[in-house]
Image (cartoon, grey):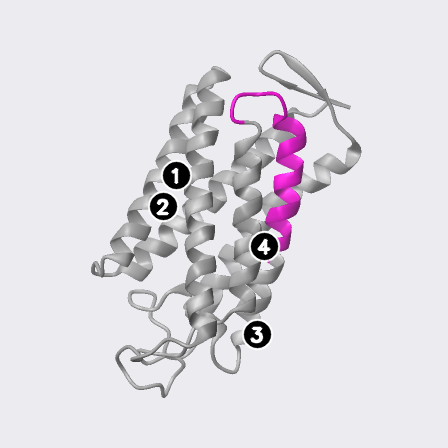
Amino acid sequence: MTAVQSGTVTPVTPATRTLLACSVAAAALFTVVSLAQAFTREGFDLMRHPLSMLSTGDLGWLQIANFLVSGALTIAGAIGLRRVLHGTPGGTWAPRLILVNGVATAAAGVFVMDPGDGFPAGTPLGQTGTLSGSALMHMVAGSIAFTALIAACFVLGRHFSRAGRPGFAAASRLSGLVFAFGDIWAMSGGQAGSLTLAIGAITAMVWVAVVAADQRAALR
């Protein structure tokens, strides 16, 4: 089997298809599990609670598992993208950044946020005064994951520009911009910042999944 990228032919193994499918599965799993909880768990309000807060409470194990499994699938997908993008512009750094995103996402599942601002149900409103060590590490892991994924979108934009695919290049950069805006807006305390952050993160994850699916379809 081979993949054709920017005029080069790169040998691939049957396992590459599976690795790329993992990238698609990562975005689907994280989005479905997170939003299903966001709309059903008592006390959760996506307008003011980040998706990470779903890791708290009696059902917190669901989101913890979501982070861990999605992170592992993202890592596998990054390996697949490295195989098919090898030797192309952006083909080195895009998979590396997505790999970092996967590792940091899994780390965000290990380190859990503190309850706060009314969630889980029964928690006092408002923010807690001092972050626990786990919450602090979660923020660090999240920041690394966000930065890596945003950067990966822009690197993919360069890749597709050089490959003569302006539509994919524009979509890559737009996904990065949406995520960057959502993150900055949330970090600045903007209204409904948790919602804009969720939209940005899911947009970028879904776009990477689209890229992986496109590369998988190109294998022959």
> Is 168 located above or below residue 29 in the figure?
above
Q: Earlier in the sequence, mark 4 or mark 2?
A: 4
Check disc 3 and report the residue beneath it.
Answer: 61
The quadrant of the picture occupied by the N terminus is: top right
Q: Identify the residue at the far top of this view.
A: 7
Q: Gap in Å between the C-alphas at discs 2 and 1? A: 6 Å
Q: Which residue is mark 2?
A: 179
Disc on the earlier residue, 3 or 4: 3
Name the disc covering residue 151, or none: none
List x then y, in percent, for residue 111: 52, 69
Q: Quadrant of the C terminus?
A: top right
Q: Assign a secondary structure to mark 2.
A: helix
Q: Amino acid at mark 4?
A: Gly
Q: Secondary structure at mark 3?
A: helix
- In the rendering, at what x and y percent does residue 24 appear? 59, 44
Dominant SS in magenta: helix
Q: Residue at x 58, y 54 (%)?
A: 71
Q: CA distance from mark 3 to mark 4?
A: 15 Å
Give the residue pinned by disc 4: 71
Residue 40 seen: no
Q: Which residue is mark 1?
A: 175
Q: Is residue 131 above or below residue 166?
A: below
Measured in 3D between alpha carbons, the distance from the residue under mark 4 to the one under mark 1, in whole angstroms, is 19 Å
Choose the circle earlier in sequence order: 1 or 3: 3
Q: Secondary structure at mark 1?
A: helix
Numbered disc 4: secondary structure: helix
Amino acid, disc 1: Ser
